[in-house]
Image: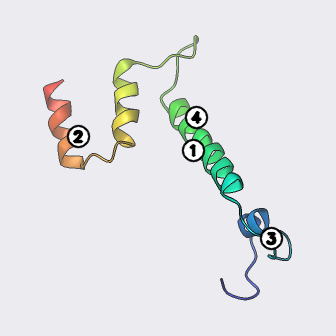
């Protein structure tokens, strides 16, 4: 990292003086929380009904978005549904 560059993320991981070591536990905890937040936001973008449910099509779209499918393959699969 460049000297003098400081952000909330580097402070979170390495402390205010950037002297702390990053543990695997802290990294995995951060990653889990980040993934949960992103997936929660994506779910909310599908406008769940009053019971908090989304449609099967919306669910499938979310799965495909994170499955690493190439766009061409997504289009082919959508046509067969």
Which residue bears the numbered disc 3?
A: 20
**Quadrant hosting residue 67:** top left
Verify CB contact (< 8 Å) between mark 3 and mark 2: no
Mark nearest the camera among 3 and 1 is 3
Lower position in the chain sequence, tag 3 or tag 1: 3
* Residue 40 badge: 4
Relative image position of residue 71 (x, y in whole percent) = 24, 48
Lower position in the chain sequence, tag 2 or tag 4: 4
Crowding at dot 2, Cα within 10 Å, few <14 / some 14-19 / many 20+, comes out as some
Secondary structure, mark 2, is: helix
> CA–CA distance between discs 3 and 4?
31 Å
Say how many tags the image has.
4
Which residue bears the numbered disc 2?
A: 74
Lower position in the chain sequence, tag 3 or tag 2: 3
Lower position in the chain sequence, tag 1 or tag 2: 1
64 versus 49 height, above or below: below
Secondary structure, mark 1, is: helix
Verify CB contact (< 8 Å) between mark 1 and mark 2: no
Task: Identify the residue shown where x is 40% and y is 34%.
Answer: 62
> CA–CA distance between discs 1 and 4?
8 Å
Q: Is residue 20 left or right of residue 50?
A: right
Relative image position of residue 80 (x, y in whole percent) = 13, 27
Lower position in the chain sequence, tag 1 or tag 4: 1
Which residue bears the numbered disc 1?
A: 35
> CA–CA distance between discs 1 and 2?
22 Å
Secondary structure, mark 4, is: helix
């Amino acid at each position: 990292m460049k000297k003098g560059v400081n952000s909330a993320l580097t402070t979170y991981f390495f402390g205010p003086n950037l002297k702390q070591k990053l543990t695997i536990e802290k990294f995995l905890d951060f990653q889990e929380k980040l993934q949960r937040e992103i997936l929660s936001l994506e779910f909310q973008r599908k406008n769940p009904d009053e019971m908090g449910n989304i449609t099967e099509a919306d669910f499938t779209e979310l799965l495909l978005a994170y499955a690493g499918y190439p766009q061409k393959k997504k289009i082919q699969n959508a046509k067969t549904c």
